[in-house]
Image (tube, coloured by chain):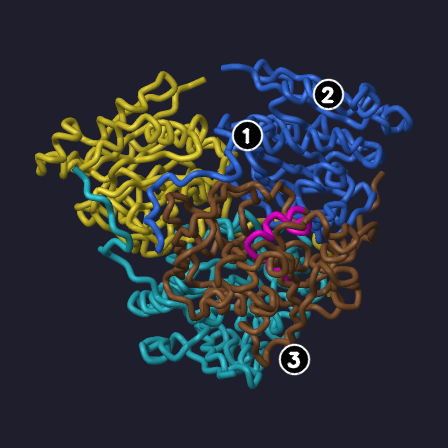
Chain colours: A cyan, B yellow, C blue, D brown
Amino acid sequence: MTAVKVTIWNEYLHEIRNPKVAEVYPDGIHQAIASGIRSEEFEIRTATLGEAEHGLSEQVLKETDVLIWWGHMAHDQVDDTVVNRVYRRVLEGMGLIVLHSGHCSKIFNKLMGTPTCQLKWREADEKERLWVVDHAHPIVSGIGEYIELPMEEMYGEHFNVPAPDELIFISWFEGGEVFRSGLTYRRGQGKIFYFRPGHETYPTYRNPEILKVISNAVRWAKPARTAAPVYGNTSPLETIKEKK
Amino acid sequence: MTAVKVTIWNEYLHEIRNPKVAEVYPDGIHQAIASGIRSEEFEIRTATLGEAEHGLSEQVLKETDVLIWWGHMAHDQVDDTVVNRVYRRVLEGMGLIVLHSGHCSKIFNKLMGTPTCQLKWREADEKERLWVVDHAHPIVSGIGEYIELPMEEMYGEHFNVPAPDELIFISWFEGGEVFRSGLTYRRGQGKIFYFRPGHETYPTYRNPEILKVISNAVRWAKPARTAAPVYGNTSPLETIKEKK
Amino acid sequence: MTAVKVTIWNEYLHEIRNPKVAEVYPDGIHQAIASGIRSEEFEIRTATLGEAEHGLSEQVLKETDVLIWWGHMAHDQVDDTVVNRVYRRVLEGMGLIVLHSGHCSKIFNKLMGTPTCQLKWREADEKERLWVVDHAHPIVSGIGEYIELPMEEMYGEHFNVPAPDELIFISWFEGGEVFRSGLTYRRGQGKIFYFRPGHETYPTYRNPEILKVISNAVRWAKPARTAAPVYGNTSPLETIKEKK
Amino acid sequence: MTAVKVTIWNEYLHEIRNPKVAEVYPDGIHQAIASGIRSEEFEIRTATLGEAEHGLSEQVLKETDVLIWWGHMAHDQVDDTVVNRVYRRVLEGMGLIVLHSGHCSKIFNKLMGTPTCQLKWREADEKERLWVVDHAHPIVSGIGEYIELPMEEMYGEHFNVPAPDELIFISWFEGGEVFRSGLTYRRGQGKIFYFRPGHETYPTYRNPEILKVISNAVRWAKPARTAAPVYGNTSPLETIKEKK
């Protein structure tokens, strides 16, 4: 079995500019996730906003089976050329895992067709409990009935996304809200998983269950290696009766 | 019961430029549909590409409950300002019925998040048979097991759209293809129905069953008058325990 | 417009046997709902377990457009003949609204194909907040962002039902659970709505918003009057080439 | 990686009683499929109606990750005890692949909640073309845009099943019908795939593409090894405020 090629993309600004975040993720969120999901099944690289082409050249994306995306304060600085490149690759079969504030990214917005930035939010050190509602899904393999995070940022409904193909987690928040926290979508030949938790000031990406979900999602989202459909004008497969 | 306010938008170029099409639709596709669905339940107006703001000013859209869209050769000439205006109105609850080659329009593409222009097609006077696969849906009220059209343009899979919320019709074509021909989607507070048939050289929009489906779809797509969600930073509804 | 014929079925045992319940619903839950949704759009009758054929004769069901179902302690006493009769009528297009503990009824179980009795529950006078997650749906017409019930029985995930066609409400509970509280399904020509709230010791069916949801659901679930499909051996519609 | 334990169940009556079928499948459909999907990834056994407990004892099912089901003329002879045993195992996570006329089996009917026996059919040596409509799905890995079968029994819509979680194939038939031919469902912790082709008089289960789809489906349907939910009365996870 060949390894799944994973690229973890991170904006990587909070960790540099904010000492409180640097304390939680000294090497950046991308490195925390990379260490956390390390496995001989995966071949992992990272990319960040500050690199040339944000680290997502044609070549890198061509060699990527699954792209993980974390962004927050600089969504607008992501170049449209790169966004369109990622878009095309998803349609060709590359898996995409959008984490937390990535809901507001250009790429997620473009793939959903709705203003995905729209949701309720609050930073108040709230307990979050992610309840599994689809126990048949490989993304929750090895996970119990729920994952509890002692403190997280709250995201609350309404979340302005299309009805997902599959709803896997629903979050309960201490302050009174709920959220659809684990959602799958298919676009073209590609599979997309949105996973809610991961505010930069909490060590969420060190939580073994959160990391397990991300690992499972990588396996689930890898390309199915199906045929690329042919589009456009086409000849009939059957003989069509002559019309008078 | 107040009437549903319907705006029928048509590119209205084929009918002017091509005598063969003018013969089929002397007053334009928009007028054919308007006559065909006339009812005291509906208050109908039309709009075309050539009018100022394509006939879709803020005021017109504000007064529109359901917008019907037919376009083909001039998708690129539709102004982005108007596209964004329609987009916002759909999210606010305006129904949208996209007909035939409207699959390639900017607005449908934007709402779907996929390159909806991608499908197979062929102009060969083929028989199309639209099989009902969801007999519980109000859009097929009064329709039999299938609708048969003696001649139509063929559209074939793969059609590059997200998996629909509801699949209502599947077309069979003489030349060997199938197509998902009646699809519903929800985006924000709005409902969308894509309906395949209606090539400009055939009298499809005079077919009583096709018109019945469009009428049913208007009733189905009208705004639900639900609350507009509030987005952004929010206070907790419950008392959150003091954290140490 | 002809009135929608609604039959409200109630087990009607708690109200007779338990003085605490009798105080909340002196005439039974069925009468509370009947008064609560009264409208010239509806023609309402009620039926209870104790009546001959549980009040659901062939004739009554034939004249029913939408059946509302509340049961709890006597699911097993519902005759299989009646269950099968309701089942057939749903497949023919009769709408079915299953309330609260009706999740455990024979008819809901049969239509879902899963042991729908399986969920978590607790009677602890908890606050429930039903968040709307589908603002495009006619079932939430006139409803705000959420419905708050000061005290209800808790139902928690995992709820062992198939993934719904549409998810409309998600409940938040004070004690830490969430629940998919408003679910739609289509079976044959019939539409089904499961709506969670309504424990017999609370005045939930006097809450104007809960009653509004039930009224909306009746309108949504009424038969679409579509063609009944023909099943079985069939002749080809097209000439099939002779095979050698 | 441990092998996936596959049990192929076949009614095995046509092959014994009908010389024409015996010619196509001399060792039975179960053996044809077993040879066809042979791989070191799978540990395959077979079971037939005529064996004690139809070859599906508690022990066998306990050791089965994915069950493949082919039946036709003797659905009624399948013991309800065995049906209920299979049902429980699917809910616990065992995958189930239902082939062709298995649509009419007790187990598929029970899991769907609809009279799944209802569809149109015809035996006329028709060409079938199974179009892929979901190119992101692992079940079509390695498959082209469609699979063509020169002769098959026709199954036509309407097929009385719930709207599937995922629609993967749509069939085109020479005689004028279409059919939803590849459908997925989740029930409890189990995954189900219905796959249409496979009439006993045609060598469909020797077709390499059909066998590839079945192999892919086995991989897809294997248990996700998720936690079994706990049902019933439960204590609050959070402190509920004292009510007056």
Q: What separation in Å lies between label 3 and label 2 (alpha carbons)?
A: 56 Å
* Amino acid type of the residue tagged 2 in the rendering: Ser
Residue at 77% x, 26% y is C10
Name the disc covering residue C70, or none.
none
Mark 2 or mark 1: whose residue is earlier in sequence: 2
> Which one is in front, D164 or D211?
D211
Secondary structure mostly seen in magenta is helix
Residue C25 location (% of width, % of height): 81, 24
The answer to whether residue D232 is magenta is no
Give the residues drawn in magenta, as a range: D95-109
D3, above or below C150, in the image: below
Residue at 57% x, 29% y is C93
Q: Which residue is mark 2?
A: C57
Q: Which residue is mark 3?
A: D2
B131, above or below D144, in the image: above
Q: What separation in Å lies between label 3 and label 1 (alpha carbons)?
A: 49 Å
Which chain's residue wears label 3?
D
Name the disc covering residue C220, or none.
1
Residue A210 location (% of width, % of height): 62, 70
In this rendering, does residue A193 appear at all? yes
Q: What separation in Å lies between label 2 and label 1 (alpha carbons)?
A: 24 Å
In this rendering, does residue A122 appear at all? no
* Amino acid type of the residue tagged 3 in the rendering: Thr
Q: Residue A150 occupies which quadrant of the picture?
A: bottom right
Kindly state the secondary structure of the residue where label 2 is placed: loop
Kindly state the secondary structure of the residue where label 1 is placed: helix
Same chain under badges 3 and 1? The reply is: no
Which chain's residue wears label 2?
C
Quarter of the figure that contains the C terminus of chain C? bottom left
Kindly state the secondary structure of the residue where label 3 is placed: loop
**Which of pointers 2 and 1 indicates the residue nearer the eye?**
2
